[in-house]
Amino acid sequence: MPDQPVPDQPVPEHPAADHPVPDQPVPDRPAAAARPAAGAQADAPRHPARDPWILAQFALAAALAALSLLGVIASLAFDAVEFTFTFQGAIQAFAIFPGLVLSLIVNALLMRAHRARGTGITRVEAVMLAIEFALIALLLLCHFWSGPGGELFGIAILAWPVAIVIAVAVGVVAGVTLGRRAAGAPGPAPVSPAP
């Protein structure tokens, strides 16, 4: 039998890169390019709410507010004066702690505005805050304990005006610093007149 000519068979083409195989998505970009650089996050500015000085002021304000509310509500609503713990504790719950709570919150918000502008707390503010925190710690000691002869009541009387003055001074310094930084910030670019 004579050889029959074999018709040309089309050779299947290998799928090219521009013709993706079905059910296999092609990534838009390499995975390495999608990840940020290792140092990119380290160079990012810290969020204002994560500043330790600001967090400490909010936390301390919450603790003082809780002690104040406990003493006031227990004394007035339930006649349970023992929840003021001491005589000076009653005075602090009704008069001293509410003022300190307000001062701490205002100061924390002012310093948060510092951070929002990209600047940190000044050294003067940090020193004054450390003094205020130390005085509040002393007031908390006096709140829960009077001492064997009640000598902590006299210490509390001396500490109250100093703590109030320091709290107000911190707010004044924070407000003045914020005002100066706002005044020194560059304004918007001037608009060129239309031709």
Image (spheres, rainbow, N blue to C red):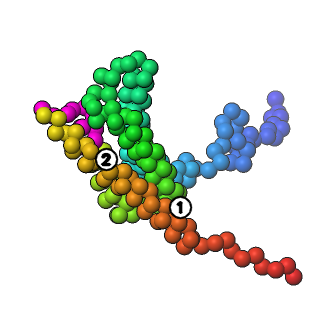
Residue 129, given in percent of the width and then of the height, sits at: 34, 54
Q: Which quadrant holds residue 120?
A: bottom left
Residue at 27% of width from left, 32% of height from top?
87
Q: On the image, which quarter does residue 91 sit in?
A: top left
Residue 137 placement (x, y as % from top left): 27, 43
Q: CA distance from mark 1 to mark 2?
A: 34 Å
Secondary element type, mark 2: helix
- Residue 136's mark? none
When the figure is inspected, residue 78 is found, relative to residue 92, above or below; the finding is above
- Please, what is the dominant secondary structure of the magenta stretch? helix
Residue 23 image point, x, y percent: 69, 33
Between marks 1 and 2 in the image, the one whose residue lies nearer the viewer: 2
Q: Which residue is mark 2?
A: 160
Name the amino acid, label 1: Arg
Query: Residue at point 62% right, 50% down?
Result: 29
**Which residue is painted at 67% across and 71% down in the image?**
188
Q: Nearer the viewer, residue 40 or 71?
A: 71
The answer to whether marks 1 and 2 mark residues whose Cβ atoms lie closer than 8 Å is: no
Residue 67 visible from this viewpoint: yes
In the image, the segment drawn in magenta is 138-148
Q: Residue 117, which numbered label?
A: 1
